[in-house]
Image: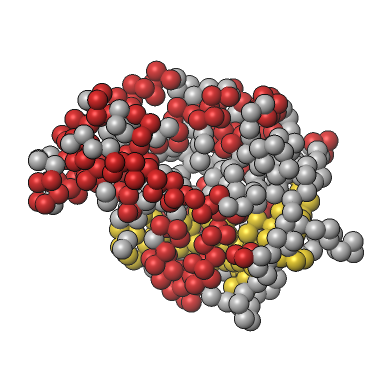
Amino acid sequence: MTSKIFAAAAFGLAVLAGAPSAFAAADPSSPDAFQPCTDARGDLAGSLCARFETPLAAAFPALGRASLFVRRFPAEGPSRGQAWLIAGGPGESGASFYPLLKTFRAALPGYDLIIPDHRGAGFSTRLCPTEESPDSPGGAALRGAEWATCLPTLNTPRAKAFTITNAARDLSALMARYGDDKPTLLYGVSYGTQLVLRTLAVAPPRRLDGVILDSLVPPEDTKTLDLSHRSVVVDGVGRQVLAQCDADAACRARLGGSAVMAYRQVVQDPKLAALVPGGKPKLFFGALLDAPALRARIPDLIAALRAGDAKPLERAEADLEAFGAPFGAYPQSPPSIPLVALISASENNARPAMTKADVEAEAKVLLFVSSLPGQLVGGAADAYPRDAWFGKRPAKLPPTLVLQGDMDPKTPYAGAAAQVGALKAAGPIALTTVKGGPHFLAFTAPDCFVTATRAFVATKRPGRGTCSVK
């Protein structure tokens, strides 16, 4: 894996080097018990923190141990049970949920919210414990010379322990340690849905009353909807936007005819493309698909470009940055790019032999693209071998609700539908379609998310339904 890939990605130690400020020394009589977090202020007020130690790889004790960080937000009022929130990524920490606590409390009223950091992410043991320490020069993110000293660790036996299956065993162990006899729910988003399903296959928790899967990943054995095909997925959603404009007389009139033709003009004219932030219109407009409000502005942005006016695009760029800004406010917020690269190359790339020329050739026929396929090129050299659990589905499912946007540019609707179909034999599962919904619906479509989740939690009976993004 080259440093170029990591730079482009900007999605045996017992403890993490540089102990995080959120955690203070526990009671010696119970070293892994929850206790008040030292950073329990503002959004984190009242939270409790714990550290749980587990082998990096049970079969190879010489690799040492991993320290897993967990934060609990007690219910407001009497507790009805606990809900475990599993972040996406790979490489994201549980801090991605902290800005959304009001949404999760509304969706899961009366439940304690328990949020772990995956191994390799956040305040848990990292792939590069020195370079990714919150106390390092770049904080949890890699900076400058830290890249050169971190990258070689990807091709070591220790790095090969940072697998999805080992992370699944972590989650099961955490739920066993901190679970109780009250109702227990498990929520995952994006990569978190893959980790939840792997956990249910490898080491099902003792008690689990319901599962909520937000932006469900395709089946692991997909050959067409994996990460190497991300640009194709993004292009499909982008073309939906253009088709919606063509179906609206006023929108079509603003562009003087076909939205596809108007957009092609922008893409193919070097002078117009140069007005786009970054100079790559396919990539820029592809990024706008993540945010419904920005996605809706795409026809007007095309019209502005054709008129030679770059100001609306500059505003869109600023709004796109503001869209993601709430998720960078915590010391453990920066994603672990080494972990992203390792797991993506090892388990979610159906085309490991893909070259840069292949990526460029595919992008030529697309109107909207993602940078991700290019970031995967060369990653196979550092990948770990897939284990026997790859592609295996849970033998048994508790009641499971799937929430999926039909305009998701990351985990495509078709992939989620295929996954649901494959899982039906294991237990009660149903898909709620969020019309116009993009990715991470708890964030991008909170009203739909809260309504559907509350109904499911009240009955534990997943039902098919629809909702529309406002």
Residue 381: x and y in percent read 59, 22
Relative horizontal placement of residue 58, taking residue 405 as reference (left or right): right
The residue sitting at the right extreme is: 29
The answer to whether residue 468 of the structure is visible from this angle is yes
Figure quadrant of residue 113 = bottom right
Relative horizontal placement of residue 329, taking residue 234 as reference (left or right): right
Label tally: 0
Residue at image coords 34%, 30%: 280
Residue at image coords 29%, 31%: 275
The answer to whether residue 54 of the structure is visible from this angle is no
Residue 79: x and y in percent read 63, 78
Residue 212: x and y in percent read 50, 62
Residue 196: x and y in percent read 57, 53
The residue sitting at the top extreme is: 357
Task: Give the camera-side residue of 26 and 459.
Answer: 26
Residue at image coords 30%, 48%: 295
- Coloring scheme of the render? secondary structure
Task: Give the camera-side residue of 438 and 433.
Answer: 438
The relative height of residue 70 versus residue 310 in the rendered view (above or below) is below
For the C terminus, which image quadrant? bottom left
The relative height of residue 467 versus residue 269 in the rendered view (above or below) is below
For the N terminus, which image quadrant? top right
The residue sitting at the bottom extreme is: 78
Relative horizontal placement of residue 263, taking residue 368 as reference (left or right): left
The relative height of residue 366 versus residue 54 in the rendered view (above or below) is above
Figure quadrant of residue 228 = top left
Task: Give the camera-side residue of 82 and 324.
Answer: 324
Residue at image coords 54%, 45%: 89
